[in-house]
Image (cartoon, rainbow, N blue to C red):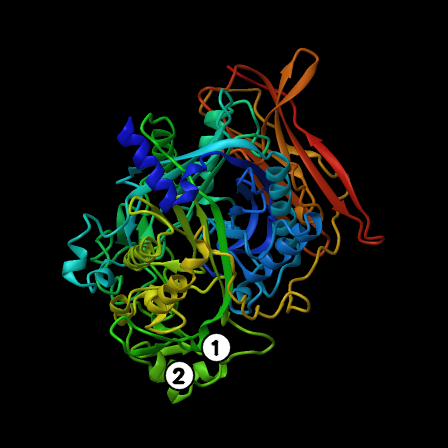
Amino acid sequence: MLVSSWYAAALFSLYPSCALAQYLLGVGMGDITGPVTETNMMGYAALSQTDTGLHMRQWSRAFIVAEPANPSNRVVLINSDIAMGDSGVRRAIVAKLSQLYPGVYTDNNVGLVGTHQHAGVGGYLENLLPQLTSLGFVRETFDAIVTGTVKAVQDAHNSLATGSLEFGTTDILQGNINRSPSAYLANPAAERAKYAHDQDKTMTVIKFKGASGQADRGLLSFFPVHGTSLYENNTLVSTDNKGMAAYLYENFVEPTSAPGKNKFVAGFVQANVGDTSPNTLGAFCESPGKPYDGQPCEFYQSTCGNVTQECHGRGPGFQVSDFESNYLIGSYQFEGAKNIMTSSSLTSVAGSVRSVHVYINMSNYTFTLPNGTTARTCKPAMGYGFAGGTTDGPGAFDFKQGTTSGNPFWDLVKGAVTPVPSQEQKDCHAPKPILLNTGEATFPYDWQPSIVNIQMFRVGQMVILLVPGEFTTMAGRRIRDAIKAKLVEKKVIGSDGVVLLAGPSNTYAHYITTREEYGVQRYEGGSTIYGPATLEAFTDIYSNLVGYLADSSTTTPSPGTAPPDLTQNPLSLRTGVVLDNVPLGSSFGKVLTQPSASYAKGKQVSVRFQGASPRNNLRLQDTFLTIERQNGSSWTVYRTDSHPSTKFNWKRTNGVLGYSEVTITWDIESDAPSGTYRVVYNGDYKNGWTGRISSFVGQSSTFTIA
């Protein structure tokens, strides 16, 4: 006992924050689903991927941790079902929170992380390049994300209560693969030998525990896997595998709560996601009639017959559908999180809550490398390898990954798209051949960000790096190790402390590879927009901020210059809804195809209605459909449009006259209660003469489930 007491006293003298093991904890959710029809989706940058309906709603999940004795020391991590964080979205969120809670939520302590799913609504990022396929900025998407996220933080704030945190880890071997293994192999053999896999397989979970005797509040999980389980040809808005994992866990805890109505909140956060893929069977040639059809793609450039378009990754449910693969990858993460949450050997989190945030201009950041030489970053630019795409989403034309030299034709054409790069710009990015010189493209506004958000959170012995892009596996390992060493050196945490990556957060600065991977110029290297020194630059920047997380720190760094607000007068070529109409003799909500009289479990119900554009009313925190079960003389909602068993499909049948139809499907689960059901469609139509929007309801005939 004497030794234990002496050890505790010594520990507290070195790390006073270790005495703090209780926190104020808050969790909340908000619906952020933008227009689910006639809007380009975000992730694959494919013009053809325009949404036609809804599979699962997008959510922001907010997690607040504060010190009970000094609640001003707090952080809020927002895990959002969007492709990536964005400076404009974050700016608007912080502004609204600052109005609601002056001095409480600021640039310093609010972090926005995207799950990096590729099935969400697009058009919300403020720079031009990611807006091109969505025909510019989509205000409805932007506003939905901001409104729903603020609601999530408000709910978390209002739920603040004393609790504690614990964490643990587990390995998920079947949850991801490396989609650019040839680039990974360029890293030093000695470095690669330290790791069993060319992907990080370890999941870390932070458990949000209620006060003694009270239920758990939520969890934050960190695991790297791309949100590309749902393919590029999917046009139903959804949340991909991270959103599926969150649904599965929240439903596991509260099986009778509809999605979004649950009190327990599960956040499945991305980590060093850059070169990961959920298509774990590998990449194969889909080349009917050719001798290499069904064979693995070429290793170095992921081609089939020397073209990229026929090389596609396959998920674990490939023989069923990409939705099955999405479920499986989500379920692996759910099961991993459950194993950790139910473990009796978790580690308590104890210590202070701290945060630090600055803006850094990455277009010419000059710094000193560990060997004493000077290095600098470059103005943004995209390489030829970027246009080659990935095995998750192949590129177009004759572009290929692994391209380290230009092409005479595209070298000529590219000058008509972005400014011709100077020799200085070429030299800075070498060996990347520049395809899009985005850093010097400023019409009508900046194509890519030069200024990025840099942020770190500390809760006790845990430090989270909120990174503004997609770090590859090895890049993530290097910056984690470097920052942990600096944290230990500065006595911010002990050697048993944990450093986690969360990204893409706050700003989307595309990819960050190691210098060796950059030299290979696969997709990730071609998309490392600040040049070959990007990883070392970020490592230097985060290292310089470590001291501000210490208990003894009483100062804050210079905040830097914030990026310009590009959302005030953005380009937008997308047209609004003109009118909704119905054929003669029909009416809005009329059932055009009724369900069958009865169904067996495992079958699909399908009902077709006379519809109207869902863009008229996003129905945030609401639903476009309900599956209702009869209880005596009343009806009870059994499923909504955010349940994975339902799909809401919209189709414009006459663009001139404004006719459209809605098809609602429900895949009956094996555990669905027997009984009598009906399908209800909630819609809104726009009067072409007055512009007035009016709601209506369509209701199917009843059917039974045996």
Can you say whether 650 is above or below 306 in the image?
above
Q: Residues within 10 Å of mark 2 (few under 14, many from 20)?
A: some
- Whether pointer 2 and pointer 1 mark residues with C-beta atoms closer than 8 Å, the reply is yes
The x, y position of residue 95, in whole percent, is: 66, 56
Q: Which percent across, then down, holds residue 306? A: 26, 67
Residue at image point 31% right, 51% down: 313
The residue lying toward the viewer, choosing from 682 and 145, is: 145
Q: Residue 210: percent from the left, percent from the top?
A: 50, 28
In-image side of 33 versus 407 (left or right): right
Neighbor class of circle 1 (other Cα within 10 Å; few <14, some 14-19, many 20+) is: many
Residue 225 visible in the shown view:
no
Furthest residue to the bottom? 423
Compared with 125, 550 (above or below) is above
Question: Measured along the vertical axis of the image, is residue 408 above or below residue 312?
Answer: below
Real-space CA distance between mark 2 and mark 1, rounded to the nearest whole angstrom: 9 Å
Q: Quadrant of the N terminus?
A: top left
Dot 2 amino acid type: Gln
Left or right: 553, with 472 as reference point: right
Which of marks 1 and 2 precedes in the sequence? Answer: 2
**Location of residue 527 in the rendering, given as x and y in whole percent from the top left corner:** 38, 67
Q: Three-letter amino acid code at disc 1?
A: Gly
Question: Which residue lies at the image location 55% right of the left edge and 67% below the top edge?
Answer: 127
Label 2 sits on residue: 425
Element class at badge 2: helix
Q: Relative to residue 638, is residue 518 drawn left or right?
A: left
> On the image, numbered disc 1 is attached to which residue?
439
| Along the line of sight, the residue nearer the viewer: 545 or 271 | 545
In which quarter of the view is residue 320 placed?
Answer: top left
Q: How many marks?
A: 2
